[in-house]
Amino acid sequence: MAAAWKVAGLTYNRYISVASRVVRRSLKEDKRIAAERRGESELRFAKWENGKQGDVKELNDAALQAQAAAKAAESAA
């Protein structure tokens, strides 16, 4: 039997992110604020080609674009 997050079409990282957000929002105000600050992160990456750095992109934005492109390709097929 597949895990519920797989059946829902989520990656494990996305599942953990959603679960963490739910837990943080269920905390009392003082603990919630501290937990939400710990949960924030910004990841950036750049693709290097021929020894030159390409555009720096936000990881979340790039992931959303890739998912949208995959869905568009899937629906076109």
Image (cartoon, rainbow, N blue to C red):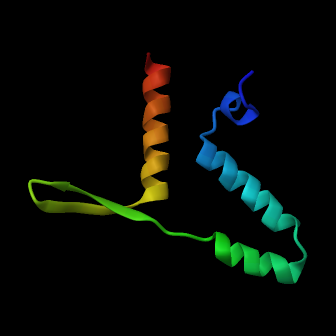
Image quadrant in which you'd find residue 48: bottom left
Q: Position of residue 1 (x, y in %)?
A: 75, 21
Q: Residue furthest bottom?
A: 30
Residue 16 position in % (x across, y down):
68, 51
The foreground one among 76 and 43 is 43
Q: Residue furthest front?
A: 1
**Depth order, front residue of 14/3:** 3
Residue occupying the point 60% across, 48% down: 13
Camera-nearest residue between 72 and 1: 1
Q: Quadrant of residue 2?
A: top right
Decide: is 75 above or below 58.
above
The reply, left or right, for residue 28 in relation to residue 69 is: right
Residue 75 placed where, x, y %?
50, 22
Q: In this image, 56 relative to 48: left or right?
A: right
Residue occupying the point 77% across, 80% down: 33
Q: Is residue 53 left or right of residue 24?
A: left
Q: Residue at x 70, y 32 (%)?
A: 8
x, y (%) of residue 53?
A: 18, 63
**In front: 54, or 73?**
54
In the image: residue 31, left or right of residue 44: right
Quarter of the figure with the C terminus? top left
Q: Quadrant of residue 28?
A: bottom right
Residue found at the very far top of the displayed protein: 77
